[in-house]
Image: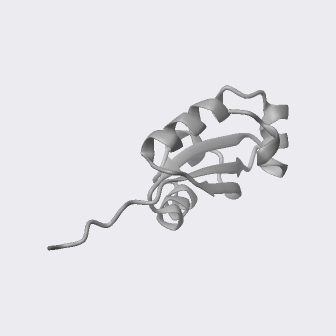
């Protein structure tokens, strides 16, 4: 019987060249970061290159990753900056 490989979902936050923040999720963090850096990942980051990763975390699954992503996207910029430095301080 073949083993099922469970995908590890990650949440990440990028800081764009214009100092804005971009939040996303993926199952392949390195590939997705490379796509952002090459300008092939999203329209938002494509026009704000270069980008650098300022936060990432592993999630329990896709549902958990989506919930965290939405919660972070609802935060103010100031709260996002706090979350980047101290992710345990923001209740989601």
Q: Position of residue 47 (x, y in %)?
A: 60, 44
Q: Is residue 1 at least partly visible in the picture? A: yes
Query: Vertically, is 25 above or below 30?
Result: above
Along the line of sight, the residue nearer the viewer: 20 or 12: 12
Render colour scheme: one colour
Q: Locate residue 5: give its quadrant.
A: bottom left
Looking at the image, residue 47 sits to the left or right of residue 63; the answer is right
At horizontal 58% and vertical 38% (from top left) the residue drawn is 69
Looking at the image, residue 10 sits to the left or right of residue 52; the answer is left
Q: Is residue 50 at least partly visible in the picture? A: no
Query: Vertically, is 52 above or below 45?
Result: below
Q: Locate residue 90: give its quadrant.
A: top right
At horizontal 85% and vertical 41% (from top left) the residue drawn is 82
At horizontal 51% and vertical 42% (from top left) the residue drawn is 64
Q: Quadrant of the N terminus?
A: bottom left
Q: Position of residue 38 (x, y in %)?
A: 52, 61
| Outermost residue, front side | 1
Query: Vertically, is 26 above or below 77?
Result: below
Disc tally is: 0
Q: Position of residue 63 (x, y in %)?
A: 45, 39
Q: Quadrant of the C terminus?
A: top right
At horizontal 49% and vertical 59% (from top left) the residue drawn is 32
Q: Position of residue 22 (x, y in %)?
A: 64, 42
């Amino acid at each position: 019987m073949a083993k099922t490989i469970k995908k590890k979902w990650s949440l990440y936050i990028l800081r764009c060249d214009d100092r804005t923040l971009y939040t996303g999720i993926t199952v392949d963090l390195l590939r997705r970061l490379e796509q952002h850096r090459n300008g092939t990942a999203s329209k938002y980051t494509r026009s704000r290159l270069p980008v650098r990763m300022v936060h990432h975390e592993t999630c329990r699954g896709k549902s958990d990753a989506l919930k965290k992503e939405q919660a972070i996207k609802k935060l103010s910029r100031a709260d996002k900056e706090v979350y980047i430095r101290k992710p345990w301080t923001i209740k989601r």
